[in-house]
Image: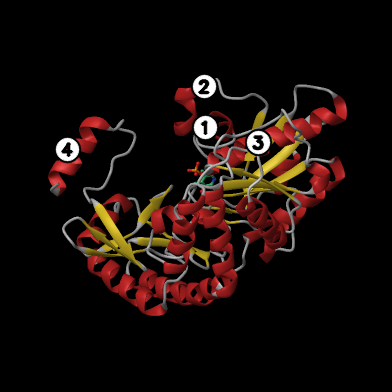
Amino acid sequence: MKKTEIIEKAEANLLHTYNRFPVVLDRGEGVYLYDCDGKQYLDFAAGIAVFALGYHNPDFDNAVKAQADKLVHTSNLFYNEPAAETAEKLNRLTGMDRVFFTNSGTEAIEGAIKLARKYAYNKDGCTDHEIIAMNHSFHGRSMGALSVTGKAAYQDPFKPLIGGVKFAEYNDLDSVKDLVTDKTCAVILETFQGEGGIYPAEEGFLKGLRRICDEKDILLIFDEIQCGMGRTGKMFCYQHYGVEPDVLTVAKALGNGLPVGAFLCKEFAAALVPGDHGTTYGGNPLVCAAAGKVLDLFEERKLPEHAKEVGEYLYQQLEGLKERHSCIKDHRGMGLLQGLEFVESTPVGEVCSKAQDQGLIVISASGNVLRFVPPLIVEKEHVDEMIRKLENCLD
Ligand SMILES: *Cc1c(COP(=O)(O)O)cnc(C)c1O
């Protein structure tokens, strides 16, 4: 099928929930994608921070193929080896004790919210517990996750959402303190806000939250669906700060493109018991074999260290770009999770489109921010190529 036919067919049949770019992607190799006409794109989006290992990684592909030939699904009424192995690896890497596998990020958030409510319910038997979330956060599109997502445009058409959610300001400890009551069961936040505009947490903020949650026996939930898994230069972003959550959510990079997420918790917080929660597909052998291989390759190839090194180079190059172009207002981030904020007269959507003409894929984040979330296998020469292409768009 030709490109225009594919686009027409998609537009005629899919629910129009995305304004897609007019590009039909066909295959990938390393950090490059190819469209159906064979045009090459350098990919600094990685399927929205998903393809950490890059495209067509033979070790990953072979692990998936081997499991596909063996057994794809079992239901959670039975055990399977990949889920057991991968849960153990995840616990070791995160410092958590219990894993529940989901099919997506938003489902990991749903599970974390249910866990927090059940934990508080077990203590006092009340059914009116509250959650503190952050303005400009993003946690997903299902009703529970949307309820803790601090963005009116996403929430308003779908109200009423789940009750008892209050919003504080990110990196403002006093704004959280003001909202804490005896009913608070959880504080949920991204350790590094991605979608909301590339804002890392400040150390004092995370340490302060940890202190408040310890004092009041409130569960601290870190959403590392985007910032986790090596992207910021450590396996998990909270490991930069010496602050551990009680509950952690992961997804995006975990399956390197296969749909798998998870929420994890400390033993004391493992309040969900048989009957409380479930999923038909979650943690099936296919996605767990994929996730297990991803975790092995992260360790073998030292991808967090690599992300740190190339991320520092990316930082310098983006600083240079900012100095050369007055349309760039700010530069934020670390590792391979960085953003450039543009002035209003330069809409980032247009920059993304122009970049595609140049053979570069980049995506936006809220607040007119251009987001850089390349595969973690990216090298300095790819950063140079990206800067050249982006510079052509800005000139
Ligand atoms: C993408 C994202 C989610 C939602 O994940 P889905 O797999 O799209 O449901 C939740 N939290 C954060 C921080 C994300 O970046």
The span from disc 2 to disc 3 (Cα, nearest Å) is: 35 Å
* Mark 3, secondary structure of its residue: loop
Mark 2 burial class by Cα count in 10 Å: few <14, some 14-19, many 20+: few
Mark 4 burial class by Cα count in 10 Å: few <14, some 14-19, many 20+: few
Res. 135 image quadrant: top right
175 or 191: which is nearer to us? 191
Res. 283 image quadrant: top right
Q: Which colouring convention does the figure follow? A: secondary structure
Q: Which residue is drawn at 25% across and 48% down?
A: 21
Q: Which amino acid does label 1 sit on?
A: Ser
Point out which mark residue 8 bears.
4
Question: Which one is earlier in the sequence, the residue at label 3 or at label 1?
Answer: 3
Mark 4 or mark 1, whichever is nearer to me:
4
* Mark 1, secondary structure of its residue: loop
- Label 1 CB, ligand 1: below 8 Å? yes
Q: What residue type is labelled 4?
A: Glu
Residue under label 2: 159
Are the residues at dot 2 and dot 3 in contact (C-beta closer than 8 Å)?
no
Residue under label 3: 77
Mark 2 or mark 1, whichever is nearer to me:
1
Question: Which one is earlier in the sequence, the residue at label 4 or at label 1?
Answer: 4
Question: Which one is earlier in the sequence, the residue at label 2 or at label 1?
Answer: 1
Residue 339 image offset from top left, x and y in percent: 44, 60
Q: Residue at x 49, y 72 (%)?
A: 311
Residue under label 1: 142
Q: Which amino acid does label 3 sit on?
A: Leu
The span from disc 2 to disc 1 (Cα, nearest Å) is: 12 Å
The quadrant of the rendering that contains the C terminus is bottom left
